[in-house]
Image (cartoon, grey):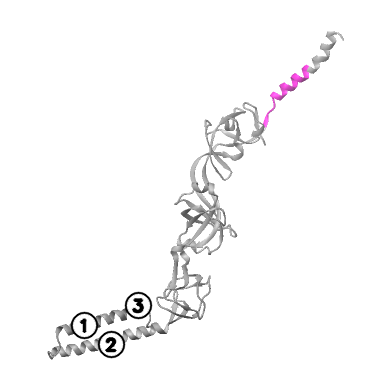
């Protein structure tokens, strides 16, 4: 085949290829843009847990004397009002005897002192005998006061709730005899609830006492309560394999929660206002994070540093302009300098 013939055959191919490349350079990418604007950015950490009774609000109902529980008028978990009867307690007969003896000794000491005083007036007794009688009365009265403090003089006692609360524990049954100091039951103040949240061990160092936490009941997401981190534990809970942290609540907020209720907690780790773009607007390659902004109808790459991610936006810092529009959709196909057009 002659050389001229070969050239005649190849020229159309080269022409078509050239036209293809030239037309590719004129392709205008369809994109959607948004202005680079300022947003309130909140960095949060989510944990799940349960409403529990604050130990500081728990009171043991116990007795300084031995006796028998005759009637139990409440059940565990029951809400009680101040002054409401909760149990009937009968004092141990032997303790009642101790009170009667102490009372008898006081009466005897008083009569003995009166007799000695009469003898002194008649000069038939000495001052030493008078002092001895006075001391005997003082000792007897002290012994009686101790018995009264123990309540041994009360044969039957109807115990009433000292405050509004919930019966958090029952340790006795009707008819049970108990020793002095035994905690018959526990009452918890309803306005001292707290929430224990479980956090992944690798995240626990981010949490500090005093941080705010937004609490939402798992089965009632319409209600949210704000609390404060009051404790950060330093060991893993063997049951959950998470690290526990406590969120304290104000008294009025506790009224919306019930012990053992499951809640979702969002701890506010950081809160700041700054420039942000949609999360999908930020791309990454070997050079790091970057965005595309549109300037004079062209896509311009701008390297950025990323910050807090919040509600679908991510904070950025870099050499962008306040009036720049960032490419939010269609940025994956872009190259620096490529012609772009706002999609309709």
Prevailing SS of the magenta stretch: helix
Mark 3 neighbour density, 10 Å: few (under 14) some (14–19) many (20 or more) = few
- Which of the pair 89/164 is nearer the observer? 89
Which secondary structure lies at badge 1?
helix
Is 329 located above or below residue 264 in the figure? Answer: above
Q: Calculate the distance from the C-alpha at mark 2 to the C-alpha at mark 1.
A: 13 Å
- For the question of whether residue 110 can be seen, the reply is yes
Asked whether 87 falls inside the magenta stretch, the response is no
Answer with left or right where residue 61 lies relative to residue 25.
left
Q: Residue 142 location, x and y as percent?
A: 29, 79
Please identify the residue farthest to the left as the structure is shown: 123
What label does residue 289 carry, if any?
none
Q: Which residue is drawn at 24% across and 89% down?
A: 111
Q: Which residue is drawn at 52% across and 77% down?
A: 173
Q: Residue 319 location, x and y as percent?
A: 52, 30
Is 177 located above or below residue 317 in the figure? Answer: below
Which secondary structure lies at badge 3?
helix
Work out whether mark 2 precedes mark 1 in sequence or the reverse, and give the earlier one: 2
Q: Residue 150 location, x and y as percent?
A: 37, 78
Asked whether 19 falls inside the magenta stretch, the response is yes
Q: Name the residue under label 2.
A: 107
Q: Mark 3 points at which residue?
A: 149
**The magenta segment:** 14-29
What label does residue 134 carry, if any?
1
Mark 1 neighbour density, 10 Å: few (under 14) some (14–19) many (20 or more) = some
Work out whether mark 1 precedes mark 3 in sequence or the reverse, and give the earlier one: 1
Is 261 located above or below residue 295 in the figure? Answer: below
């Amino acid at each position: 085949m002659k050389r001229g013939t070969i050239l005649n055959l190849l020229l159309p191919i080269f022409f078509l290829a050239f036209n293809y490349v030239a037309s590719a350079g004129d392709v205008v990418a369809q994109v959607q843009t948004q202005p680079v604007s300022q947003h309130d950015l909140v960095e949060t950490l989510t944990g799940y847990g349960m409403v529990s009774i604050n130990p500081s609000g728990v009171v043991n109902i116990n007795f300084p004397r031995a006796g028998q529980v005759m009637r139990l008028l409440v059940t565990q978990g029951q809400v009680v009002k101040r002054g409401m009867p909760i149990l009937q307690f009968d004092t141990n007969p032997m303790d009642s005897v101790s009170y009667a003896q102490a009372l008898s000794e006081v009466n005897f000491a008083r009569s003995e002192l009166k007799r000695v005083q009469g003898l002194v007036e008649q000069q038939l007794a000495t001052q030493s005998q008078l002092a001895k009688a006075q001391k005997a009365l003082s000792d007897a009265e002290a012994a009686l006061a101790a018995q009264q403090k123990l309540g041994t003089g009360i044969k039957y006692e109807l115990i009433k709730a000292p405050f509004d609360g919930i019966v958090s524990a029952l340790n006795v049954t009707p008819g049970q005899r108990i020793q002095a100091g035994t905690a018959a039951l526990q009452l918890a103040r309803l306005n001292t609830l707290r929430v224990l949240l479980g956090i992944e061990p690798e995240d626990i160092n981010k949490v500090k006492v005093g941080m705010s936490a937004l609490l939402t009941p798992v089965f009632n997401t319409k209600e949210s309560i704000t609390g404060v981190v009051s404790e950060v534990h330093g060991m893993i809970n063997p049951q959950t394999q998470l690290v526990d942290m406590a969120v304290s609540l104000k008294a009025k907020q506790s009224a919306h929660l019930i012990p053992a209720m499951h809640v979702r907690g969002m701890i506010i780790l950081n809160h700041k206002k700054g420039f942000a773009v949609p999360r999908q607007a930020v791309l990454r390659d070997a050079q790091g994070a970057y965005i595309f902004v549109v300037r004079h109808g062209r896509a311009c790459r701008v390297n950025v540093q990323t910050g807090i991610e919040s509600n679908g936006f991510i904070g950025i810092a870099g050499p962008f302009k306040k009036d720049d529009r960032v490419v939010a959709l269609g940025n994956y196909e872009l190259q620096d300098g490529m012609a772009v057009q706002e999609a309709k």
